[in-house]
Image (cartoon, rainbow, N blue to C red):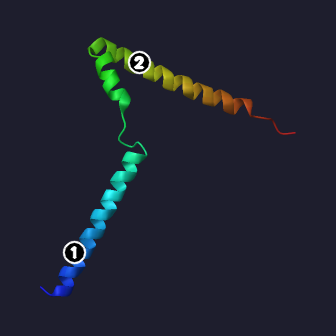
């Protein structure tokens, strides 16, 4: 292989490695890998019944949020003059 191809391959691989490192550091800094509730919930909900209850509570929370959004859009409705 020619020297220019080797130099080009080294340059591209170094650039891609640096880009991956920058992406990893950005993810760590912005908290993309933080999942603190995972460990807390694992200790709190360790049997099947409590897990079902937790899922049911999450569903109720989502329904409540959707209902609030719908009510908010209805409040802003004004009929035409």
In which quadrant is the N terminus drawn?
A: bottom left
Local SS, label 2: helix
Point out the tag, 2 or 1, that comes first from the N-terminus: 1
Circle on res. 77: none
Circle on res. 56: 2
Where does the image place residue 71, in percent across and percent down from the top left? 66, 27
**Residue density around tag 2, few if under 14, some if 14–19, many if 20 or more, within 10 Å:** few
Where does the image place residue 60, in percent across and percent down from the top left? 48, 20
Q: Residue at x 26, y 75 (%)?
A: 11
For the residues labelled 2 and 1, the Cα–Cα distance comes to 54 Å
Toward the top, the furthest residue is 49
Quadrant of the image occupied by residue 78: top right
Q: Nearer the viewer, residue 71 or 49?
A: 49
Q: On the rendered structure, is 9 left or right of 61?
A: left
**Residue density around tag 1, few if under 14, some if 14–19, many if 20 or more, within 10 Å:** few
Q: On the rendered structure, is 38 left or right of 62?
A: left
Where does the image place residue 67, in percent across and percent down from the top left? 59, 25
Q: Check disc 1 and report the residue beneath it.
A: 10
Q: Nearer the viewer, residue 81 or 36?
A: 36
Q: Residue at x 44, y 22 (%)?
A: 58
Quadrant of the image occupied by residue 4: bottom left
Local SS, label 1: helix
- In this rendering, which labeled residue sits more in front, label 2 or label 1? 1
- Residue 57 vertical position relative to residue 10 in the rendered view, above or below: above
- Residue 27 vertical position relative to residue 18 in the rendered view, above or below: above
Toward the left, the furthest residue is 1
Q: On the rendered structure, is 43 left or right of 77?
A: left
Toward the right, the furthest residue is 81
Q: Residue at x 31, y 57 (%)?
A: 21
In which quadrant is the C terminus drawn?
A: top right
Where does the image place residue 59, in percent across and percent down from the top left? 45, 23
């Amino acid at each position: 292989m020619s020297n220019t191809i080797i130099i080009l391959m080294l340059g591209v691989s170094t650039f891609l490695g640096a880009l991956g490192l920058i992406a990893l550091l950005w993810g760590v800094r912005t908290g993309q890998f933080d999942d603190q509730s995972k460990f807390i919930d694992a200790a709190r909900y360790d049997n099947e019944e409590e897990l079902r209850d937790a899922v049911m509570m999450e569903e109720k929370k989502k329904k409540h949020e959707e209902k609030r959004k719908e009510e908010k859009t209805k409040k802003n409705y004004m009929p035409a003059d």
